[in-house]
Image: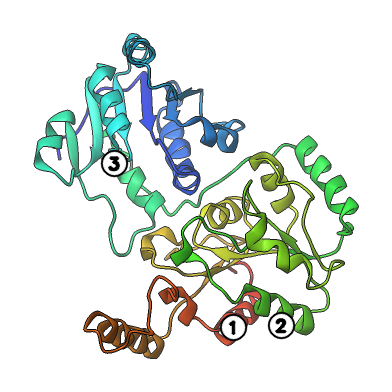
């Protein structure tokens, strides 16, 4: 790949969404800003992602994609973007609006991963890096996009920044819910917008952990509209499984998570948030690529571990046999939509991995 020898003055990083994707982009900001401290670093993202990054010390500016579909609003936005005179742009997602921003940015150097469609490569000046690999953590792959500028990616984990004031307010909220200072608690993410990524055994897992680890309490996380998915959990033991009356904002959730001893949940945004706050995590692995999970080759001492609960090979083979029988019409009772693959993971699998995490929550 051709090297860029000019020192950038104004860099635009485009990461449109989702919350978890934005969190795992944070090592890019740190790497780029440390390499080019005099350059202005701007992020372009969606409004819902801004709270996660508004305290990031490596970002100089955050721009927001306009929500309005009004053509005039869109034209004004892209004209404003062009007038900012970026010399380097990095498109980390290649969604349609990311490509529009790339097209109208006027940036001399436009970096991205190798496009899936040949005609998209004309948008970019440097795009030889694959989008993801089987072994590299996604933050590592995203940072590699800047390799034409001489950046050498490292195994940096994501980072989120919470103020002392926010942490103090979270402490007051936790106290109100019965989680006093010094009480170890576990944040629990048992919801997902996609039914195929919902594990149906969270209640059984919570009951088992409460029975085997009397020192722990649970703090249930949820977003607006997800009450029905988690209401039954708070009924297990109202004194040891608690959740706020109303869903918290992103920054409130971050602040509460920063006090947690552990996190348990799905492959979703809270998983990445917990890692970014250095909270050891147990992840119930859904149908997600392994590059979304932090497994450093040379971990820094004191870095929180992410322990994954994967489907055993035997359970996977049994599931696939049932799926093939269903497709051939020989097993009409097997309905993949009603029994997603994630539900082949047992509570015993999860408890075994949780014990492993409790015994070694951080890399030594």
Ranked by sequence position, the earlier of labels 1 and 2 is 2
Mark 3 or 2, nearer chain start: 3
Residue at 39% from the left image edge and 64% from the top image edge: 288
What is the number of the mark on residue 347?
1
User: How far is mark 1 from mark 2, CA to CA?
Assistant: 8 Å
Numbered tag placed on residue 170 in the rendering: none
Taking depth in this image into account, of 70 and 109 the one nearest to the observer is: 70
Residue 317 is drawn in which quadrant? bottom left
> In which quadrant of the rendered view does residue 210 lie?
bottom right
Sort mark 2 into few (<14), some (14-19) or many (20+) by Cα contacts within 10 Å. some
Determine whether 42 is above or below 254 in the image.
Answer: above
Q: Nearer the viewer, residue 217 or 226?
A: 226
Q: Are marks 1 and 3 in contact (CB under 8 Å)?
A: no
| Disc nearer the start of the sequence (1/3) | 3
**Residue drawn where x is 53% and y is 71% of the image:** 199
Please tell me which residue is depicted at 34% across the width and 8% down the height of the picture.
Answer: 83
Rendered view: 86 above or below 118:
above
Q: How has the structure been colored for display?
A: rainbow
| Residue 314 appears in the rendering | yes
Confirm or deny contact between disc 3 and disc 2 (CB under 8 A). Answer: no
Image spot of residue 206 (x, y percent): 70, 75
> In the rendered image of this protein, does residue 105 appear above or below residue 83?
below
Q: Do the residues under discs 1 and 2 have CB atoms within 8 angstroms?
A: yes
Asked if residue 188 can be seen in this view, the reply is no
In what element is the residue under mark 3?
loop
The residue singled out by tag 2 in the image is: 208
**Residue tagged 3:** 145
């Amino acid at each position: 790949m051709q090297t860029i020898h000019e020192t950038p003055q104004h860099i635009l990083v485009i990461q449109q969404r989702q919350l978890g994707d934005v969190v795992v982009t944070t090592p890019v900001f740190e790497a780029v800003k440390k390499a080019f401290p005099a350059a202005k670093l701007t992020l372009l993202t969606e409004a819902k992602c801004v709270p996660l990054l508004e305290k990031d010390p490596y970002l100089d500016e955050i721009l927001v994609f306009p929500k309005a579909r009004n053509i005039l609003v869109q034209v004004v936005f892209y004209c404003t973007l062009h007038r900012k005179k970026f010399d380097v742009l990095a498109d980390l997602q290649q969604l349609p609006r990311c490509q529009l921003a790339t097209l109208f940015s006027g940036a001399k150097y436009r970096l991205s991963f190798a496009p899936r469609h040949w005609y998209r490569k004309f948008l970019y000046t440097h795009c030889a890096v694959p989008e993801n690999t089987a072994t590299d953590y996604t933050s590592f792959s995203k940072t590699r996009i800047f390799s034409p500028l001489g950046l050498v990616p490292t195994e940096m984990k994501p980072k989120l920044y919470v103020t002392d004031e926010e942490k103090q307010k979270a402490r007051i909220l936790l106290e109100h819910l019965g989680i006093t200072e010094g009480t170890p608690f576990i944040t629990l993410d048992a919801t997902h917008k996609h039914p195929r990524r919902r594990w149906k055994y969270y209640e059984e897992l919570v009951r088992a952990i409460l029975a085997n680890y009397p020192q722990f309490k649970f703090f249930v996380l949820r977003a607006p509209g997800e009450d029905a998915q988690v209401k039954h959990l708070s009924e297990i033991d109202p004194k040891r499984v608690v959740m706020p009356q109303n869903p918290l904002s992103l920054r409130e959730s971050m602040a509460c998570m920063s006090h947690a001893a552990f996190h348990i949940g799905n492959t979703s945004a809270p998983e990445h948030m917990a890692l970014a706050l250095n909270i050891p995590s147990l992840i119930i692995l859904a149908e997600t690529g392994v590059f979304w999970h932090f497994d450093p080759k040379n971990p820094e001492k004191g870095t929180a571990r992410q322990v994954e609960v994967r489907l055993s090979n035997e359970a996977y083979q049994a599931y696939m046999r049932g799926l093939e029988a269903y497709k051939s019409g020989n097993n009409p009772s097997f309905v993949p939509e009603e029994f997603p693959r994630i539900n082949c993971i047992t509570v015993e699998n999860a408890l075994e991995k949780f014990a492993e995490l409790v015994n070694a929550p951080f890399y030594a």
